[in-house]
Image: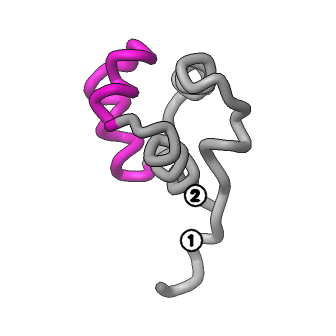
């Protein structure tokens, strides 16, 4: 299983925010933002900061998907 942040990117569109806006609002590091873009694991603290910045729940920004199935 791997993390998918597609829900996060859709939420940003709905809120008319850019990834740069999220970066500023959440205070996340550039390396964490890169991990998010690459669908890599990030800390629970990073996810908490995103939820606070976007006023949402963790289920609104991340889900786990089966990575053993070919695309």
> From what the image shows, is residue 69 above or below residue 62?
below
Indicate yes or no whether the magenta region holds residue 33: yes
The type of colouring in the image is: one colour
Marks 1 & 2, CB-CB < 8 Å contact: yes
- Reading the chain from its start, which is encountered first: label 1 or label 2? 2
- The residue segment tinted magenta is 18-39
> From what the image shows, is residue 17 above or below residue 51?
below
Q: Position of residue 7 (x, y in %)?
A: 57, 52
Q: Residue at x 50, y 34 (%)?
A: 42
Q: Position of residue 54 (x, y in %)?
A: 57, 26
Q: Residue at x 45, y 17 (%)?
A: 26
> From what the image shows, is residue 15 above or below residue 47?
below
Quadrant holding the N terminus: bottom right
Q: Is residue 12 left or right of residue 33?
A: right
Residue position for label 2: 2
Q: Residue at x 39, y 35 (%)?
A: 17
How far is mark 1 from mark 2, CA to CA?
6 Å
Other-residue count near label 1 (Cα within 10 Å), few / some / many at <14 / 14–19 / ≥20: few
Q: Is residue 69 left or right of residue 19?
A: right
Q: Position of residue 5 (x, y in %)?
A: 52, 50
Please tell me whether mark 2 sits on a helix, a strand or a loop: strand
Please tell me whether mark 1 sits on a helix, a strand or a loop: loop
Indicate yes or no whether the magenta region holds residue 59: no
Q: Which mark is residue 67?
A: 1
């Amino acid at each position: 299983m791997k993390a998918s942040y597609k829900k996060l990117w859709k939420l940003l569109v709905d809120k008319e925010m850019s990834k740069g806006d999220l970066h500023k609002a959440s205070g996340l590091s550039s390396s964490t933002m890169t991990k998010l873009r690459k669908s890599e694991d990030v800390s629970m603290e990073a996810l908490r900061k995103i939820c606070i910045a976007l006023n949402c729940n963790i289920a609104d920004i991340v889900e786990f998907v089966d990575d053993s199935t070919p695309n």
